[in-house]
Amino acid sequence: MRAILVGLAVLLPAVAFAGAPQFGFQSWFGGFDKAELQVGFATYQANCARCHSLNLVSPGDLQSLGLTPAQVTALLAKGKPPALSKTKPDAGGAIAGDLSLYEAGHRRGAAAVFDLMTGYRPALPNMTMLPGHYYNIAYPGGQIAMAPALQPGSVMLADGKAASVPVMAHDVAAFLAWTADPTLDERKATGLRAIFFLLVLGVVGFVVMATRMTR
Ligand code: HEC
């Protein structure tokens, strides 16, 4: 018995940490962090919008991130030409696809985008690089036809400081999780209410049964 308890005490935290979510909304009860999503949207506008579209996102959706219509308009103007627009082929025939649902179709979701954004390294001396490609340790094959996109100093945080590359990578990854699954928060709230209801129902049922049996 004691061995089992000790085993559990060692294993459970290990399991919990191995699968620790990098993003709050991936935990059981966590929702999206609107401040993060706002930084993520600003990052997308400043660094991604000129190549990648977000066709499934409308300016109205963006207001649900807590932005005013004026802020949305200002941010959209920054992404020109043309933000939230058509997919354009890039040099070398590689396509910069629409990002609206990218994370929904990717097994690792937000973590995949974060790793890709922070995966650029200088090419090793013995590497033969394809023309127009960049070494990225997170990309299958290691060579991607997308230059490092996150420009330091391109996004300002609420405290007036420039967002670092890892912060932009994290928040744009969170933002693209939201574009891929904008109703996640509502679903979790509904789920919690259902669990609460079932618990109360269970307790009531138990009390009714117990009082009947003691009669
Ligand atoms: C200069 C144009 C350009 C910019 C700016 C750009 N991308 Fe890309 N992106 C591309 C191209 C081209 C590809 C396809 C690469 C390939 O097929 O090798 C791509 C591919 C991708 C992919 C798919 C990788 C895969 O698994 O196939 C993701 C995700 C992505 N970009 C995210 C972003 C994000 C996020 C930003 C902004 C931080 C961004 N991109 C900025 C051109 C761009």
Image (cartoon, rainbow, N blue to C red):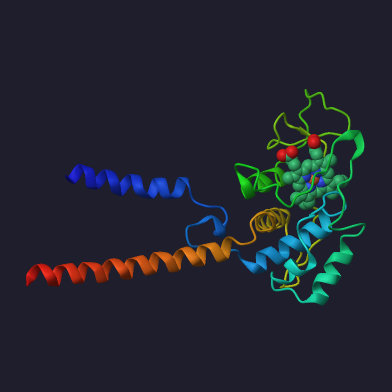
Q: Residue 193 at x, y = what percent?
A: 44, 69
Q: Which residue is drawn at 90% across and 33% down?
A: 92
Q: Of 56 and 130, which appears nearest the observer?
A: 56
Q: In this view, does 189 lie above or below 86?
A: below
Where in the image, quadrant-wise, is ligand 1 located?
top right
Q: Is residue 207 above or below residue 172?
A: below
Q: Which residue is drawn at 50% across and 57% down?
A: 27
Q: Which residue lies furthest to the left in this view?
A: 215
Q: Of 8 and 87, which appears nearest the observer?
A: 87
The answer to which image quadrant residue 78 occupies is bottom right
Q: Is residue 113 above or below residue 91?
A: below
Answer with left or right where residue 120 lies relative to residue 108.
right
Answer with left or right where residue 140 lies relative to residue 185.
right
User: Which quadrant of the figure contains the C terminus?
Assistant: bottom left
Q: Of 65 and 122, which appears nearest the observer?
A: 65
How many callouts does the rendering have? Answer: 0
Q: Residue 21 at x, y = what percent?
A: 52, 52
Q: Residue 79 at x, y = what percent?
A: 87, 60
Q: Residue at x 82, y 59 (%)?
A: 45
Residue 120 appears in the rendering: no
Q: Residue 175 at x, y = what percent?
A: 69, 58
Residue 212 appears in the rendering: yes
User: Which quadrant of the figure contains the N terminus?
Assistant: top left
Q: Which residue is drawn at 25% across and 46% down?
A: 6
Answer with left or right where residue 15 lies relative to residue 172.
left
